[in-house]
Amino acid sequence: MGRFRGGLRCIKYLLLGFNLLFWAIRHVQTMYEEAYNDYLKDRGKGNGTLITFHSTFQCCGKESSEQVQPTCPKELLGHKNCIDEIETIISVKLQLIGIVGIGIAGLTIFGMIFSMVLCCAIRNSRDVI
């Protein structure tokens, strides 16, 4: 029964991780939409925030870039929807973090197995002497 509970706990934490992933994406998208709407109301209010979003994610605007063109990066040639770019980039980065985390966990398990084998080898060599 203990192994079953441990497996359920693992699944519970994995689901929590996925929920945090989608929450993070939605939170950044909401921050962008607030800055976008503030800029449309008052051209000077959200200017720095939009410039930072546009240069970080290499995108410009939501449906069209005409309204926020002064805040767009100069090297950006075409229109890229920032809401889609935010979701794409954060998903890719979090997948990379997950892959690295799984690799570190595998390396840690390998280290624990190696240390147990070494411990058993030292204990068995003492019995011989």
Image (cartoon, rainbow, N blue to C red):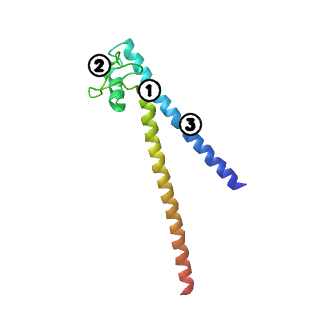
What residue type is disc 2 on?
Answer: Pro
Which element type, helix, strand or loop, lies under badge 1? helix
Q: Which residue occupies 65% across, 51% down?
A: 7
* Residue lying furthest left: 74
The residue to which callout 1 is attached is: 83
Q: Earlier in the sequence, mark 2 or mark 3?
A: 3
Q: Quadrant of residue 32?
A: top left
Q: Which residue occupies 46% across, 41% down?
A: 94
The residue to which callout 3 is attached is: 19
The 10 Å Cα crowd at callout 3, few under 14, some 14 to 19, many 20 or more, is: few
Location of the N terminus by quadrant is bottom right
Residue 56, position in %: x, y?
A: 34, 32
Q: Earlier in the sequence, mark 2 or mark 1?
A: 2
Residues at discs 2 and 1 in contact (Cβ within 8 Å): no
What residue type is disc 1 on?
Answer: Ile
What residue type is disc 3 on?
Answer: Asn
* Residue lying furthest bottom: 129
| Front residue of this view, candidates 52 and 59 | 59
| Front residue of this view, candidates 75 and 11 | 75
Q: What separation in Å lies between label 1 and label 3 (alpha carbons)?
A: 19 Å
Q: What separation in Å lies between label 2 and label 1 (alpha carbons)?
A: 18 Å
Residue 120, position in %: x, y?
A: 56, 74
The residue to which callout 2 is attached is: 70
Q: Quadrant of residue 39?
A: top left
Residue 109, position in %: x, y?
A: 52, 60
Above or below, comparing residue 26 to residue 14 in the picture: above
